């Protein structure tokens, strides 16, 4: 099993370049099969979840050309089935966007229920409600989401709570429905806007993405396009918080600072310096953070995906902090691992972490149980005295491109080794001691 071994205590210093946004890329790749013409997509992150989705669309018959590490061409003209039922589909969350894409294009989809990080029950009732409002008959049968429509007709859809996935999925189907669809209380996250912009570049007619109300006029056909995916706000946030936690000085490049405002505000509040440029942010920290209170909320609130990094940063704060998770019900699993490193955190009612700052963390063997919680454990390893081993790195590699290489470039003492490779572990320890 592969694991990261980290020697903590070194500040991160230098520049890091952020990759394309995983969660936008998942929607965009699904959308790309909705035209029979070729679509070229740039700034695609080179990570496991994306490779899996590309495998899934290849299984459907789409042609995928990997032009280079970050550029792909997709042609959906030879799709020969609307059934996506392989193990790949079940491994990731983003495969559910194929329901909207196939339903929109072929009026039928049978897609295995999605997998993804175990951070709560993650129902898909809002997606189903949206498809049904467009006239589809949707059932869950034999572990598949089966959606079929003789006619897809635009409608008004009101989500009583916002959902990124449901907003994107309904947008996909609705852009090839007859007439107008209005999504009210739509999710406003940057990746909703990016998928909408991509669909518009293919000839869709979507207005209002990024606001509460999205209006979509259906078109009968979409065409080829060339598109560049936005930078990953979560990867950027992770490096911003890691820079702060390690008392470092890092220029995080290729970002859209507006998408990072909630993170910047919290960092400033706890005493970290953040300087914004047009497409970069510089994070500088030289002392333990102040304590604070944070609640995760839909965009533009503080993103749930950054909650583990926030909690981890606050383990070394000078007072008592409260972090409340309001989006997913099971997103504090990494906390048990942090306590092995000496953090003082109590989780109450499963959604609130009370963090009493301690003076230091100490390295330990810890295990990642989801993507963002895993990245937070690496961050804790950078903050801790001595050696930390983070097991189950495959979770982290699902969503972070070249994670340990980017960290190494900033001066982190981190290496990926096989747990049985005692020689490599010894070599690392010799090198960093
Ligand atoms: C997306 O998940 C992201 N995943 C998540 O990132 C992210 O944490 C989340 O949005 C919130 O920003 C992808 O884009 C692939 P939601 P998604 O639908 O679409 C409930 C990462 O690490 N809900 O906005 O699944 C749901 O249970 C991942 O990159 C329903 O009840 O999130 C949750 O409590 C982890 N019924 C809330 O709504 C539904 O039909 C928000 O979920 C849909 C959602």
Image (tube, rainbow, N blue to C red):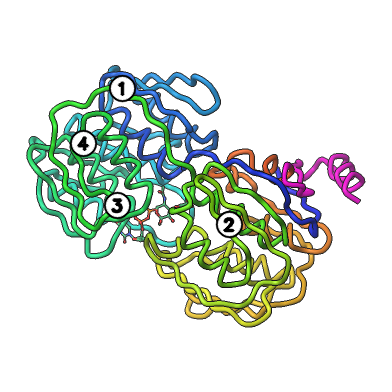
- Foreground: disc 3 or disc 1: 3
> Does 56 appear above or below 112?
above
- Foreground: disc 2 or disc 3: 2
- Residue 245 placement: quadrant: bottom right
Check contact, mark 2 vs mark 4: CB within 8 A.
Answer: no
Residue 233 on the magenta segment: no
Mark 2 Cα shell of 10 Å, populated few (<14), some (14-19), many (≥20): some
Instruction: Please give the residue where the numbered disc 4 appears in the rendered image.
Output: 103
- Foreground: disc 1 or disc 4: 1
Which secondary structure, mark 4? helix
- Foreground: disc 4 or disc 3: 3
Closer to the chain start, of discs 3 and 1, is: 1
- Residue 320 placement: quadrant: bottom right
Distance between the alpha carbons at the discs numbered 1 and 2: 43 Å
Quarter occupied by the N terminus:
top right
- Asked whether mark 4 lies closer than 8 Å to ligand 1, one says no
Residue at 53%, 68% (x, y): give it: 266
- Foreground: disc 2 or disc 4: 2
Check contact, mark 1 vs mark 2: CB within 8 A.
Answer: no
Instruction: Please give the residue where the numbered disc 2 appears in the rendered image.
Output: 275
Q: In this figure, what is the number of numbered marks? A: 4
Distance between the alpha carbons at the discs numbered 4 and 3: 24 Å
What percent of the width, then of the height, locates residue 413?
A: 79, 49
**The magenta stretch spans which residues?**
409-433
Is 422 positioned to the left or the right of 301 in the image? Answer: right
Instruction: Please give the residue where the numbered disc 1 appears in the rendered image.
Output: 76
Residue 189 visible from this viewpoint: yes
Closer to the chain start, of discs 1 and 4, is: 1
Which secondary structure, mark 2? strand
Distance between the alpha carbons at the discs numbered 2 and 4: 45 Å
Instruction: For ligand 1, give the image quadrant.
Output: bottom left
Which secondary structure, mark 3? loop
């Amino acid at each position: 099993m592969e694991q990261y071994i980290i020697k903590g205590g070194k500040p991160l210093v230098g520049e890091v370049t952020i990759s394309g946004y995983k969660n936008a890329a998942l929607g965009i790749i699904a959308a790309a099969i909705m035209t029979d013409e070729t679509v070229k997509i740039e700034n695609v992150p080179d990570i496991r979840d994306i490779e899996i989705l590309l495998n899934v669309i290849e299984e459907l018959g789409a042609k995928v050309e990997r032009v280079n590490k970050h550029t792909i061409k997709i042609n959906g003209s030879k799709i020969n089935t609307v059934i996506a039922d392989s193990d790949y589909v079940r491994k990731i969350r983003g495969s559910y966007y194929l329901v909207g894409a196939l339903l929109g294009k072929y009026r039928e989809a049978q897609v295995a229920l999605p997998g993804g990080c175990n951070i709560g029950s993650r129902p898909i009732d809002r997606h189903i409600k949206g498809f049904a409002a467009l006239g589809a008959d949707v059932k869950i049968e034999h572990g598949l989401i089966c959606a079929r429509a003789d006619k897809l007709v635009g409608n008004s859809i009101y989500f009583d709570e916002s959902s990124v996935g449901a907003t994107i999925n309904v947008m996909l189907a609705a852009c090839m429905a007859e007439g107008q669809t209005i999504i009210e209380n739509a999710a406003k996250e940057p990746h909703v806007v990016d998928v909408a912009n991509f669909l518009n570049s293919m000839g869709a007619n979507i207005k209002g993405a990024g606001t509460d109300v999205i209006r979509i006029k259906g078109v009968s056909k979409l065409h080829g396009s060339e598109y560049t995916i936005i930078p990953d706000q979560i990867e950027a946030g992770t490096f911003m918080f890691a820079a702060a936690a390690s008392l470092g000085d890092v220029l995080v490049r290729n970002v859209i600072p507006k998408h990072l405002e909630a993170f910047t505000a919290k960092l400033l509040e706890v005493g970290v310096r953040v300087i914004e440029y047009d497409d970069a942010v510089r994070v500088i920290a030289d002392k333990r953070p102040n304590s604070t209170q944070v609640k995760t909320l839909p965009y533009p609130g503080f993103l749930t995906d950054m909650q583990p990094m926030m909690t981890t940063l606050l383990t070394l704060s000078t007072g008592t902090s409260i972090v409340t998770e309001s989006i997913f019900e099971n997103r504090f699993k990494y906390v048990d691992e942090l306590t092995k490193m000496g953090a003082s955190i109590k989780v109450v009612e499963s959604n609130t972490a009370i963090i009493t700052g301690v003076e230091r963390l100490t390295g330990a063997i810890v295990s990642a149980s989801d993507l963002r919680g895993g990245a937070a454990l690496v961050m804790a390893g950078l903050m801790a005295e001595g050696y930390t081993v983070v097991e189950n790195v495959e979770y982290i590699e699902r969503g972070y491109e070249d994670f340990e290489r980017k960290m190494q470039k900033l001066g982190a003492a981190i290496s990926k080794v096989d747990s049985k490779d005692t020689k490599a572990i010894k070599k690392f320890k010799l090198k960093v001691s």
